[in-house]
Image (cartoon, grey):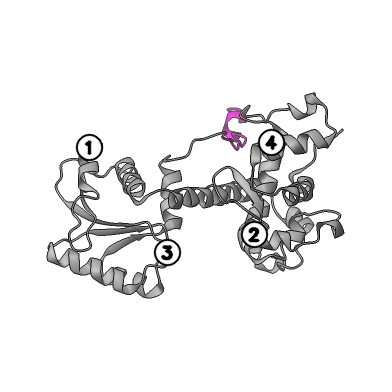
């Protein structure tokens, strides 16, 4: 028997969650699905090439991820999942399958997948209501497909990182800012940076950190673990605090986003803005809160090696 694809696991996972009276652990859901699958123990124990998890568990995980992106499943707490109100509203008995094409009718999923479907020729980009996946496969080279899937994985990791950050306390966020700035080469020692952040509470400034290990210049920090969009008044307040300190450099870091007016105001003042998207990108770039599970190398022929001297 062939292992089901993640697409083929979406409907069984939805039906399983519909049976539950309360949120269920993904590991428990995976076990139930494996018991119902009719697969042999050898098939269920097949591991990914990385050796980190079974193929079946990985595919259930991706089925869950895509259903979450479509807002059909919600995660009330870490490691648990349940049907969302939208998921409960669907008559699963009328469906023969759930796949990416079906999920494209949900706006949140279409937005999530839009980057994955982008190709250089915009005329070939499919309409979100009727994606032409075969056309995409024919127009993309294997290297382009590898890059697109890598970007999709990265977006998923960034989304999960931001969710985890928001679930933790403001104190955790301040420590995270310290770790990130030190990883980027700022703040001198980690101890110096830790003492600088979250200690001033001085008129809109959350911390002061050295730009280099010698402490030749200072950077003033504002770190906000917020849900709401940061507006121009917040930037103006930070700008005023910088002026009081006769400071030249400021960085405003948040888990949310900045309004257009806030961005324009910051540009005029030389304030660097780091929103949730850029924050998680930097975390991945500097290996903070993530680990490399597996890497791929793209090879090309070294033509010079095969040229004979005349």
In terms of depth relative to the viewer, which is nearer, 75 or 187? 75
Q: Is residue 310 left or right of residue 44?
A: left
| Alpha-carbon span between mark 2 and mark 1 | 42 Å
**Which range is magenta?**
295-310
Residue under numbered circle 2: 71
Q: Earlier in the sequence, mark 3 or mark 1?
A: 1
Asked whether, in this view, residue 87 is left or right of residue 200, the answer is right
79 is higher (above) or lower (below) than 127:
above
Give me the C-alpha separation between circle 2 and circle 3.
Answer: 21 Å
- Report which residue position mark 3 lands on: 257
**Across the whole image, how many numbered discs are drawn on residues?**
4
Label 1 or label 4, whichever comes before in sequence order: 4
Residue 297, position in %: x, y? 58, 35
Q: Which residue is mark 4?
A: 57
Mark 3 in CB contact with mark 4 (< 8 angstroms): no
Residue placed most toward the observer, 227 or 158:
227
Tag 1: Cα neighbours inside 10 Å, few (<14), some, or many (≥20)?
A: few
Vertical position of residue 36 compared to residue 230: above or below? above
Give the quadrant of residue 251. bottom left
- Picture coordinates of residue 237 (x, y %)? 24, 69
In the rendered image of this protein, does residue 236 appear above or below residue 141?
A: below
Please name which of the two marks, 3 or 4, marks the residue nearer to the observer. Answer: 4
Return the residue found at the far top: 42
Dot 2 falls on a residue whose secondary structure is loop
Mark 4 lies on a secondary structure that is helix
Residue 179 position within the rendered picture, expressed as x and y whole percent measured from the top left: 33, 42
Per the image, the residue denoted by label 1 is 191
Quarter of the image with the N terminus in it: top right
């Amino acid at each position: 028997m062939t292992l089901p694809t993640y697409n083929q696991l979406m409907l069984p996972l939805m039906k399983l969650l519909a049976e539950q009276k309360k949120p269920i652990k993904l590991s428990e859901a995976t076990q139930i699905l494996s018991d119902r699958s009719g697969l042999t123990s050898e098939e269920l124990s097949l591991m990914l090439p990385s050796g980190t998890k079974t193929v079946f568990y990985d595919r259930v995980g991706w089925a869950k991820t895509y259903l979450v992106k479509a807002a059909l499943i919600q995660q009330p707490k870490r490691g648990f999942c349940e049907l969302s109100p939208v998921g409960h509203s669907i008559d699963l008995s009328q469906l023969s399958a759930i796949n990416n094409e079906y999920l494209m009718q949900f706006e949140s999923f279409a937005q999530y997948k839009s980057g994955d479907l982008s190709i250089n020729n915009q005329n070939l980009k499919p309409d979100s209501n009727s994606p032409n996946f075969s056309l995409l496969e024919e127009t993309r080279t294997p290297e382009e497909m590898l890059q697109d899937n890598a970007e999709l994985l990265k977006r998923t990791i960034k989304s999960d990182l931001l969710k985890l950050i928001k679930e933790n306390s403001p104190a955790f966020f301040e420590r995270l800012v310290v770790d990130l700035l030190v990883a980027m080469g700022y703040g001198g020692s980690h101890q110096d940076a830790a003492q600088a952040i979250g200690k001033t509470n001085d008129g809109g400034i959350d911390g002061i950190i050295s730009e280099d290990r010698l402490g030749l210049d200072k950077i003033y920090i504002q770190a906000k673990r917020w849900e709401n969009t940061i507006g121009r008044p917040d930037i103006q307040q930070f700008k005023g605090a910088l002026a009081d300190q006769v400071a030249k450099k400021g960085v405003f870091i948040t888990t949310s986003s900045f309004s257009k007016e806030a961005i324009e105001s910051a540009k005029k003042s030389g304030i660097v803005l780091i929103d949730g998207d850029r924050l998680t990108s930097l975390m991945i770039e500097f290996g903070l809160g993530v680990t490399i599970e597996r890497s791929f190398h793209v090879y090309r022929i070294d033509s010079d090696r095969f040229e004979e001297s005349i």
